[in-house]
Amino acid sequence: MNTREVPTAPRQEVVEQLKSARRAQHVTQEVLAERIGTKKSNISRLESGRYNPTLDFLIRVAEGLGKHIHIEIN
């Protein structure tokens, strides 16, 4: 792998878990966005893979769903 290439699989996995948690709680993108102080379009872009989120943003989204981000390095 080129040193500039960033693997997308871990990011996609986190996004899918957040998206699944949001849907399981029957929370709309709009409501989640309001909870964390962002725009619905940012949640939509995150879930569609058109956004490269910061770790801080992912943590805010998780917290907005009552969840936590757990990072494990193998």
Image (cartoon, grey):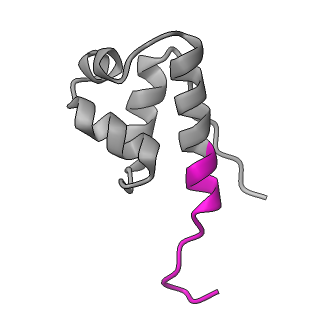
Q: Does the magenta stretch include residue 21?
A: no
Residue 20, above or below 41: above
Question: Could you tell me which quadrant the N terminus lies in?
Answer: bottom right
Q: Which residue is drawn at 35% across and 24% down?
A: 29
Residue 39, above or below 6: above
Q: In which quarter of the image is residue 59?
A: top left
Q: Is residue 63 left or right of residue 20?
A: left
Please state the extent of the stretch shown in magenta in the rendering.
1-13
Q: Which residue is drawn at 44% across and 52% down?
A: 49
Q: Which residue is drawn at 64% across and 47% down?
A: 13
**Residue at the far right in the pictured view:** 74
Q: Which residue is drawn at 38% across and 30% down?
A: 60
> Residue 15: image x %, image y %?
53, 42
> Residue 72: image x %, image y %?
71, 48
Q: Is residue 9 left or right of residue 48?
A: right
> Residue 7: image x %, image y %?
60, 69
